[in-house]
Amino acid sequence: MNLQKRFETVAVVGEPNVGKSTLVNALVGQKVSIISPKAQTTRYNLLGLFVEGDTQIALTDTPGIFAPRERLGRAMVNAVRTAMHNAARVLWVIDASHPRISRSIDLLQKIPNVQAAIVFNKIDRVAKPKLLELAYYLNEQYPFEATFMVSALKQDGIQKIKHFLAESAPSGEWLYPEDQVTNLPLRLFAAELTRERLYKRLHQEIPYACIVETEQWEDFTFKNETRIVQNIYIQKDSQRPILLGKGGEQIHEIRASVQKELSAVMERKVHLFLYVKVHENWPEDKAFYDLWGLRYNV
Ligand SMILES: Nc1nc2c(ncn2[C@@H]2O[C@H](COP(=O)(O)OP(=O)(O)OP(=O)(O)O)[C@@H](O)[C@H]2O)c(=O)[nH]1
Ligand SMILES: [Mg+2]
């Protein structure tokens, strides 16, 4: 029996909306990162951990790689770069049904000595033979270690990636307790869940104008209950009615749905309160960058 432990850090990167967070959740086996049909859902790096045999893998879910114009965008793309530099290995996720690759391959080629594997995701939407030409082309551009074809949504092909990562990890002590799945504090995760609902329900520029902050968190241990107060910051007062919906219906549904998920995750009764506030200049507010672990000046 081999009792030697192994440990590896792996950055999960790619263009926006390709399914990086869905893949991280599938590999971890539970939801650690939020998901939405819109691009730029993930705004900062977070860890997803899993154990496979004697190996612990620390995945970093990252924002999508795009051409940023604003401060927040620059900070997000910088976070991807940092994750790639810090990780020993990269999983480069490509949307098989809509393969855009130019920005991410550019970034990948700029990182020296990184071991990378390609993950074609969303293969439930496309016939595999269609991908072979692209796979061949990409493997000519860069010495990829492996090419996977998976559907993170349908959990198809996930075990092969877990096996590959575990087998190729070097010996080393685990950096996290065996049962830990993320480094994201519950307060931040709770705020992310609310933001996920905003991304799912709001359209055009509105979701990008919102951030969520958990302002208060009170545990009533004797009752097994928690009271959580969150602020949703918008940039203009004119966005408020869109967010609230007719007669406040939308915000009520969002509140109820997040409260339900939090209660299930925390296995206790949760009372969630949402307040919508205007903070016109939040994209320039350094406090949020600090909270999310993003660099302010890049
Ligand atoms: N059909 C299909 N859809 C998928 C699959 N994986 C993810 N999706 C969908 O793709 C959309 C984006 O998924 P995310 O996991 O949020 O993508 P992401 O790459 O993390 O996106 P950003 O954080 O915005 O860069 C969501 O609507 C997912 O449900 C898959 O294997 N098949
Ligand atoms: Mg994401």
Image (cartoon, rainbow, N blue to C red):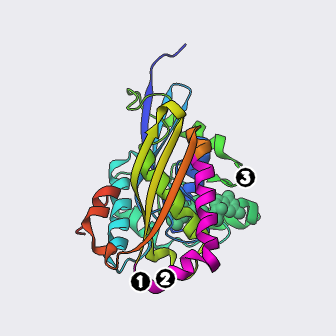
Reply yes or no: does residue 242 show up in magenta.
yes
Q: Is residue 174 left or right of residue 297?
A: right
Magenta residues span 235-262
Sooner in the amino-acid sequence: mark 3 or mark 1: 3
Is residue 34 among what the camera can see?
yes
How far apart marks 2 and 1 lie (CA) works out to: 6 Å
Asked where in the image residue 120 lies, by quadrant, the reply is bottom right
Tag 3 and tag 1, C-beta contact below 8 Å:
no
Using the image as rendered, state which of residue 193 and residue 109 is in the foreground.
Answer: 193
Q: Count the marks.
A: 3
Q: Amino acid at mark 2?
A: Gln
Q: Is residue 112 above or below residue 37?
A: above
Sooner in the amino-acid sequence: mark 2 or mark 3: 3
Tag 2 and tag 1, C-beta contact below 8 Å:
yes
Residue at 70 percent across and 48 percent down: it is 155
How far apart marks 3 and 1 lie (CA) works out to: 39 Å
Which of the labelled discs sits on residue 14, or is there none? Answer: none
- Tell me the SS state at disc 2: helix
Q: Quadrant of the N terminus?
A: top right
User: Residue 256 appears at what percent x and percent y?
Assistant: 62, 58
| Residue at the spot of label 1 | 236
| Residue at the spot of label 2 | 239
Q: Is mark 3 within 8 Å of ligand 1?
A: yes
